Amino acid sequence: MTIRVVVTVMCAVLSLTGCEPVDSSDSGDASAQETDAAASGGITDASPEPMGDMGVTADASPGEPGELTPATSCAQLAERWSDEWVRFEDQVLEITNEFRAQGYDCRSGGQFPPALPLRANEDLRCAARRHNIDMVQRDFFSHVSPDGETPDARVRKTPYPPRAIGENIAAGQPRPDQVVQGWMDSDGHCANIMNGVFEELGVGYFKGEQTQFKHFWTQVFGSQ
């Protein structure tokens, strides 16, 4: 089965650097390609280089994943995830759907008519949460992990049967409205959000008090 993969990256510290989308059809692993773009402040390089010390320490504050890893089961993540983080994730989905309902001009990403709301999907949410944990624990910021794991590979580790997937990532924004607005201000991320091909969404939010940027966000889009 051929899976369509759309990936973009946003490197942000209360602001963002946007990157152009990559749309590839591949029956195997798909690679994410990031390109430099103009920044609105903060980070000025869209390359996925490590951004300071992102390690999770043993004395992580209560409510943080701490000993959880990207290999933790989806059920355990759901059981142990912070209620506040769940609310943040749900708010990102709500705000995302508000933008989809309006239609949007994503500039170089395209002009989009109103789109149907994305449905929450727990498998995609699990993939998003795992990626946030992985980025923090292994000190990287990219769609592709240090050992080469791609967004479609992460989704395949859940029961979700993807026909098309996409991913937006960001770091630094403390509130759901800020991170979604940042994505909408970036052409490629905006196009992912507005893409009518996608029918479902999983949002992951991770707060690492011992990290430089503290707030990590991943959106995983999908359709079956």
Image: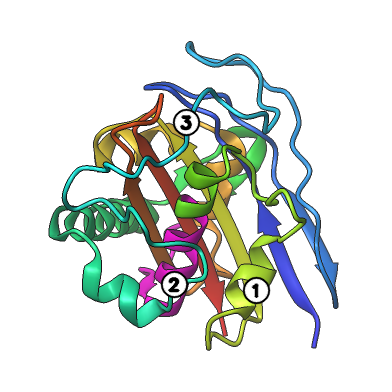
Upstream in sequence: badge 3 or badge 2: 2
Report the amino acid beneath label 2: Thr
Q: Secondary structure at mark 2?
A: loop
Residue under label 3: 185
Which quadrant is the N terminus positioned in? bottom right
Q: Secondary structure at mark 1?
A: strand
Q: Is residue 71 left or right of residue 140?
A: left
Nearer mark to the viewer, of 1 and 2 = 2
From what the image shows, is residue 110 above or below residue 96?
above
> Dot 2, crowdedness within 10 Å: few (<14), some or many (≥20)?
few
Q: Is residue 139 visible?
A: yes
Q: Residue at x 71, y 61 (%)?
A: 149
Q: Secondary structure at mark 3?
A: loop
Report the amino acid beneath label 3: Asp
Which quadrant is the C terminus positioned in? bottom right
Residue under label 2: 72
Report the amino acid beneath label 1: Ala
Residue 164: which disc? 1
Could you say where residue 167 lies in the image, as x and y percent from the top left?
57, 56
